[in-house]
Amino acid sequence: MKNLFLIAAAISFLTACGHSRPEPSPDSSGQRGNDVHSSEENGHLASNKENKKADANKESENAKAPAKSEVPEMKPIPHEEVAVKHEITYPVFPDKAVEAPEKASKAAPKGEAPSNDPLNQLVAVYVDELDSTYNTPTSNIKSGFSIIHKDERYASILFTGKLDRAEYAQDFISTLNIDLKSGCKTQLNQIVLIDGDFIDIVYGLLEDKIVGLGGDMKKLYPHGIEDLIYAADVSIDSPVHSYFNNSHITLVFSVPHKLGDYVTVTVPNKIQAVFD
């Protein structure tokens, strides 16, 4: 009965979901540079010329060297309030988190429904769906979570672990993105403006990784990735999931087991903003 109540509650929340379109945010990336200095001197003209030539070569090499791409690690937000369903650990947010996300509350006992708060009901229903989908007679899931982002507007939760199937064990990744203004699950195309430039950038980054793993991009995605990106986060078993913080968006593509189960592509917000 509790699961039916949670599912019914989540359906009512999902019908109230709204759409938002982001505004591009300014580029805040930096660039490193190196200076080469020589202080060696001697009394021989030939030696001085050699030193100057060596210094000039070093400066030329540094000038030609490309700047390193700095992508900050998407570190999870510390979170101690948790509940557990079978072997899936998930976060418990404060009561009334949708209206007042800064309010504190006590953790729910392990294995129990966290509260009647809409946000926690939504998380619990999502975990119930993970449990019913992957904890079966032929498979078993062990998963924890990381809260990648949470502010007054959005929460982005990353679930990671292991999925033991009858034929083999594999990595497990799933994501849950929530609009805290409505308390509804949201998806990538409701948060991000997906246009041709965005798709081209993601395709190029994904192709580099697939080829690096020995895969064939055209065989994996003969019809391209546009439809997959638009359908990201639609369901538990979507072939593409996403999570984000206030500076980056990461897309998680499901790939064959021989390529590692998942490939992630991270796009800085200088290319595509996340927030309104």
Image (tube, helix red, strand yellow):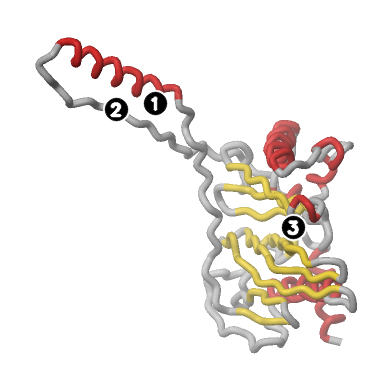
Q: Nearer the viewer, residue 210 or 191?
A: 210
**Residue depicted at x 63% and y 48%:** 249
**Is tag 2's residue or tag 3's residue first in the polypeptide sequence?**
2
Q: Position of residue 97 (x, y in %)?
A: 61, 72
Q: Where is residue 230 in the image (x, y as percent from the top left)?
A: 81, 45
The answer to whether residue 194 is left or right of residue 96 is right
**Neighbours of disc 1 within 10 Å: few (<14), some (14-19), many (20+):** some
Amino acid carrying label 2: it is Val
**Neighbours of disc 3 within 10 Å: few (<14), some (14-19), many (20+):** many
> Element type at marker 3?
strand
Q: Which of 232 and 170 is in front in this view?
A: 170
The answer to whether residue 261 is left or right of residue 58 is right
**Spatial separation of the CA atoms under disc 2 and disc 3:** 51 Å
Q: Residue beneath label 3, please? A: 186
Regarding residue 18, the answer to whether it shows in the image is no
Query: In which quadrant of the rendered image does the N terminus lie?
Result: bottom right
The answer to the question of whether label 2 and label 3 lie on touching residues, with beta carbons closer than 8 A, is no
Residue 114, compared with residue 267, is above or below; it is: below
Residue 122, compared with residue 171, is above or below; it is: below
**Is tag 1's residue or tag 2's residue first in the polypeptide sequence?**
2
Amino acid carrying label 1: it is Asn
Regarding residue 173, the answer to whether it shows in the image is yes
Q: Residue beneath label 2, please? A: 36
Q: Which residue lies furthest to the left in this view?
A: 43
